[in-house]
Amino acid sequence: MRCFFGLDILTTIPYNVRYIQDSDMVDIKKSSEYSTTDTALAAFLVTSGIQLIDLNTGSSQAEFIFKSNGQLNDLILQWDTGVSPVRQFYLAYKRFVRQIKESNG
């Protein structure tokens, strides 16, 4: 099965993701998949080479399912801490959009 952007996806996926506290960190030793509803994080993971294996759009928020690999935790940590230049760009973009909306009333 293929999703709309041409990536191969699986039809049956065990959702055995374990979250650590409030972050999106996943214990990749116990899980072969990672899921998030954070679209910006999902885009960052895809552009960083993490394989998207499914996209669930059945609810109000899309859920992105990724194949875990050795670099996943590091990438999520880079995103969460703002170390990634992409994350810095995204935060600045959101701030500018918010400022524009506030100034326009």
Image (spheres, rainbow, N blue to C red):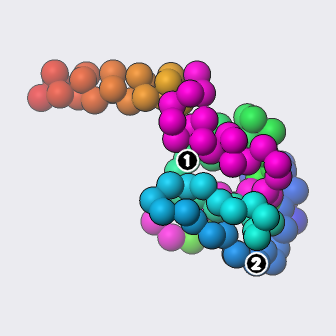
- Range covered by the magenta-colored residues: 59-85
Q: Residue type at mark 1?
A: Thr
Q: Is residue 84 visible?
A: yes
Labelled pair 2, 1 in contact (Cβ < 8 Å): no
> Camera-side residue: 42 or 60?
42
Q: Amino acid at mark 2?
A: Pro
Seen from the viewer's position, the closer of residues 87 and 4 is: 87
Q: Residues within 10 Å of mark 2 (few under 14, many from 20)?
A: few
How far from the left and from the top, in percent, is residue 62?
Answer: 56, 60
The residue at the point 43 percent across, 29 percent down is 91
Task: Determine which of the numbered discs, if any, sits on residue 101 in the image.
Answer: none
Residue 14 is marked as 2
Q: Is 53 included in the stretch rendered in magenta?
A: no
Quadrant in the picture for residue 12 = bottom right
Q: Earlier in the sequence, mark 2 or mark 1?
A: 2
Q: Residue 86: which quarter of the image?
A: top right
Q: Nearer the viewer, residue 40 or 34?
A: 34
Q: Is residue 64 above or below residue 85?
A: below
- On the rendered structure, is 86 left or right of 55? left
Task: For the C terminus, give its image quadrant.
Answer: top left
Residue shown at the point (76%, 68%) measured from the top left: 31
**Disc 1 designates what residue?**
39
Q: Position of residue 57 (x, y in %)?
A: 59, 65
Image quadrant where one finds the N terminus:
bottom right
